Image (tube, coloured by chain):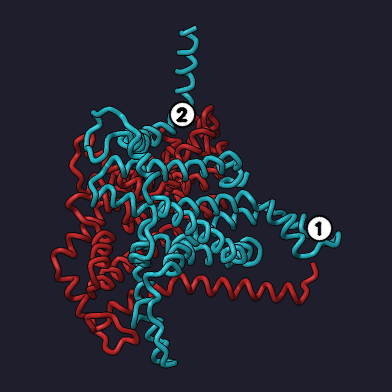
Chain colours: A cyan, B red
Amino acid sequence: MAKTSQSNMSSWLKQPGVLAALPASLFLLIGFAGPLLLVVAYSFMPSKTFTLLQAPTIENYSSIISDSYYISFFWSLAMALTTVVLLFIICYPIAYGMAKLFNKWANLVTALIAVPILISENIRLFGWVLILLKNGVFDGSMQSLFGLSISGLLFTVPAITLGLVYVYLPFMLFPLVIGISMVPETLKEAASDLGATRWQIFREIELPLSMPGLMIGGILTFVLVLGSLAEAKILGGQAIVMIADDIESAFTFAQNWPKGSALSVLLIALSGIIVFLLFRRVDLDRVIGRR
Amino acid sequence: MKASRSQNLSRRFIILWTGVVIAFLYVPMIAVVLASFSKQRYFKFPIQSWTDKWYQKAFSSLSVRELLWTSLSVAALVTIISVVLAFFGALAFARYDWKGRKLYQRLILLPIFFPQAVLGLAMLLWFSAIGVITSWQTAVFAHLVWITPIVILIMSIQVYSFDPALEEAAYDLGATRWQVLTEITLPILSPGIISGAIFAFLLSWGNFPLSLFTTGADQTIPEWLYAKMVSGYTPMVPTLGSLTLSSAAVFLLIAYIIWLAISARQRRMENR
């Protein structure tokens, strides 16, 4: 019995796919799974300690629940939800155009939208600081054109929302394009011939059939916003504290690794559940490979 | 198909809206470049007088050179290592059919969905636990954890369209494994490999949340920019910002030309 399972194991290992998967998998085992397990272990250590050699405790979690951390969790969730809804409304017409209307122009539009991803987030957010600043691009133009002074735009919740929508737009758009291009034109024509209205076609055909792309885009942006740090700090000043900010200060200013680890575990668990629910419903071969 | 008036209208709306959103994406970058040429110590719009003195200052500054060098070394190493890891990773993702592939596809993509700031902090804990002092080399490791899965995803898109029959034909004609790899698989997949390398280089070049916690005493440009932004405005922020922006643009242009040349050559080979 033991012998057959061993030979099964070695024949499984000899598949070319397994061999090809090994280097990256081993690397991520050391570089990703290892640190994660360490964070989980630290989250059960007594507060403000730097070793793993103490008796485990759940004091970090209970103090997080009794403390005011729910406020930053609330803000992160609220910002994530707002961003996803706004992005869906902003991106749907563009995605539709890229999948169905633009034809040979679609590649150019794709490139123009993808290039900013490759420019450092900090520089792009700094551009918004320059625009929203008192005497900045927006305020300055209003002053010289209409004599109106509109300051106080920076360091507000709408400014953070703007930054989040701005940074994560491509992550909603591209999955949506794939989703919408999976909807067969013939189906829509048939529905139209049978007398369906534009709204009915959208609700009954386009939306359900492009759902895999919509789900990937929505959940990708949701999780990214949930863990975002730079937008709230650069554009928000002290307006709100999001959860990643709390985690950072627990690790750095407070020097409380176990508390920071426990907060991280909660954030990871929250994002993990969402991603897991997504992956159970989506077939990656079909979406990425268009098989 | 009947093209009614309302269809024409919505078509126009979509084109207009796309233009507006693309402008929205580029306006902040233009603002950064404009600010870097402003003479005033504090940014004020409309800009009254122009200067290139901040650029002269940046080019003669030793600390700026050091920042550039650190960022460049990290990005170059990350690109080379991630492309090698991801090449095989993408073959396992999309080319071969093997037991456990579905699970692998899901697990390997997890780091992309992971909050980067938390990943950076987890790495910091990890390095201190195993007794490694953080420096730009540890940042390379941290970047790789996040960037390798992205490169796997990008290369997989190309691998899906790769016809395995070509490899099999080469084997039947007596080619060795090495010959098949270097003469069939690599050349056909090269556009995907180059796209992957472009993403790897630029994502590492611009990365902030991972570098913040894993570079130790070394500093990359995005870290420096953040530190200066938070502690107070200096005209060097837009200047260095524009410099990294334009170097990324130049890099992208060169890479695009290479990519065009390679895919054109491939099309010629296919037509023969």
**Total numbered badges shown on the rendered structure:** 2
Measuring from the top left, give residue A90's x and y in whole percent: 57, 66
Measuring from the top left, give residue B25's x and y in whole percent: 46, 69
Left or right of A255 on screen, residue B256: right
Left or right of A207 on screen, residue A44: left
What chain does badge 2 belong to? Answer: A
Left or right of A157 on screen, residue B246: left
> From this viewpoint, which residue is outermost toward the front?
A66
Q: Secondary structure at mark 1?
A: helix
Q: Relative to residue A136, is residue B224 depicted above or below? A: above
Badge 2: residue crowd in 10 Å (few <14, some 14–19, many ≥20): many
What chain does badge 1 belong to? Answer: A
Name which residue lies at 39% across and 92% down. Answer: A144
Viewer can see residue A13: yes
Between discs 2 and 1, the one toward the N terminus: 2
Q: Based on the displayed image, in which of its 4 quarters is residue B229 positioned?
A: bottom left
Asked whether B30 or B129 is in front, the reply is B129
Asked whether A106 or A83 is in front, the reply is A83
Q: Which residue is mark 1?
A: A191
- Of the residues tagged 2 and 1, which is closer to the observer? 1
Name which residue lies at 37% across and 39% down. Answer: A61
Q: Relative to residue B182, is residue B215 depicted above or below? A: below
Measuring from the top left, give residue B96's x and y in whole percent: 52, 33
Q: Secondary structure at mark 2?
A: helix
Q: Are marks 2 and 1 in contact (CB under 8 Å)?
A: no
Left or right of B265 on screen, residue B216: left
Measuring from the top left, give residue A239's x and y in whole percent: 37, 65
| Badge number at residue A18 | 2
